[in-house]
């Protein structure tokens, strides 16, 4: 991978993180040593050390003197954003959880989503529409775009059996993200939620990132009966 310019520590970090994600470097296994990585990228060992240190601090690598560097089997995400799992939220209310995958397609995201994730116009994404149920009634309708360059394994995932929220929380480590809440008319989500397009509903918008690589953007419309409870 060496070129005219030596790789930056950020680019080495991101490449190693992608190799962890696609299991080129499997959980629990040693990764190549600093000298070999430096040779591959045509850079100084100090640059590699900085990249590996960042991944270790983020909870993805375990570095030990004389024992080498291993991929942590269950990464401990040191992120301030706690991704809610819809199933747990429903079951915590004493209700039975259900899920339906309504639509799945691959292609570029719409302009507003590309702007949020800073994607080029031709970037391939996986688009998903899902309906989450509580005691058989609509709980939340979700539209989601997943960046396939960052999360290639999701292309082969059986998302009719496991919802995208759970799959990503389990399989796609993130470093940071953001979410926002607002109310708006149900619009196109009305049919799935069983309400009028003009009825106001709570909307959550969320995006997550792996360092500089965007992972996903989700737009979630909750049923009118939904109540948001926050602990203090």
Image (cartoon, rainbow, N blue to C red):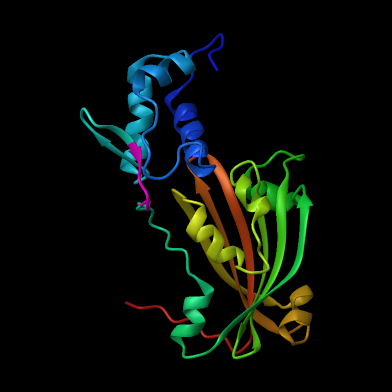
Residue pictured at 68% horizontal, 82% vertical? 200
* Front residue of this view, candidates 143 and 227: 143
* Residue 187 % position (x, y): 77, 75
* Residue 101 % position (x, y): 71, 70
223 versus 205 height, above or below: below
Magenta part of the protein: which range? 70-75
Quarter-wise, where is residue 192 in the image? bottom right
Q: Residue furthest top?
A: 4
* Residue 39 % position (x, y): 44, 14
Q: Residue furthest left?
A: 65
Residue pictured at 63% horizontal, 70% vertical? 220
* Front residue of this view, candidates 60 and 180: 60
Determine the main secondary structure of the stretch shown in magenta. Answer: loop
Tell me the quadrant of the picture where the C terminus can be found: bottom left
Query: Is 91 placed left or right of 107 in the picture?
Result: left
| Number of disc labels | 0
Residue pictured at 49% horizontal, 70% vertical? 85
Query: Is 170 placed left or right of 56 in the picture?
Result: right
88 versus 158 height, above or below: below
* Front residue of this view, candidates 43 and 231: 43
* Residue 71 % position (x, y): 37, 41
53 versus 34 height, above or below: below
């Amino acid at each position: 991978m060496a070129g005219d310019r030596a790789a930056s520590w950020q680019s080495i970090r991101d490449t190693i993180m992608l190799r962890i994600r696609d299991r080129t470097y499997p959980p629990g296994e040693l990764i190549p040593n600093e000298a070999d990585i430096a040779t591959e990228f045509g850079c100084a060992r100090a640059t590699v050390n900085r990249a590996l240190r960042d991944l270790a601090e983020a909870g993805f690598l375990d570095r030990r003197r004389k024992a080498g560097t291993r991929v942590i089997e269950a990464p401990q995400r040191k992120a301030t954003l706690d991704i809610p799992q819809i199933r747990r939220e429903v079951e915590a209310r004493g209700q039975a959880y259900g899920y339906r995958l309504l639509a799945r397609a691959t292609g570029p995201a719409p302009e507003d989503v590309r702007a949020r994730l800073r994607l080029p116009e031709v970037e391939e994404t996986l688009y998903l529409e899902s309906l989450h149920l509580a005691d058989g009634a609509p709980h939340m309708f979700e539209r989601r775009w997943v960046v396939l360059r960052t999360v290639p394994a999701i292309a082969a995932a059986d998302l009719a059996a496991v919802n995208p929220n759970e799959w990503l929380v389990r399989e796609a480590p993130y470093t940071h993200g953001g979410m926002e809440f607002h109310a708006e008319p149900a619009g196109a989500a009305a049919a799935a939620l069983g309400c009028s397009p003009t009825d106001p509903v709570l909307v959550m918008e969320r995006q997550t990132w792996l360092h500089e690589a965007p992972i996903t953007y989700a737009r979630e419309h909750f049923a009118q009966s939904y109540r948001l409870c926050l602990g203090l």
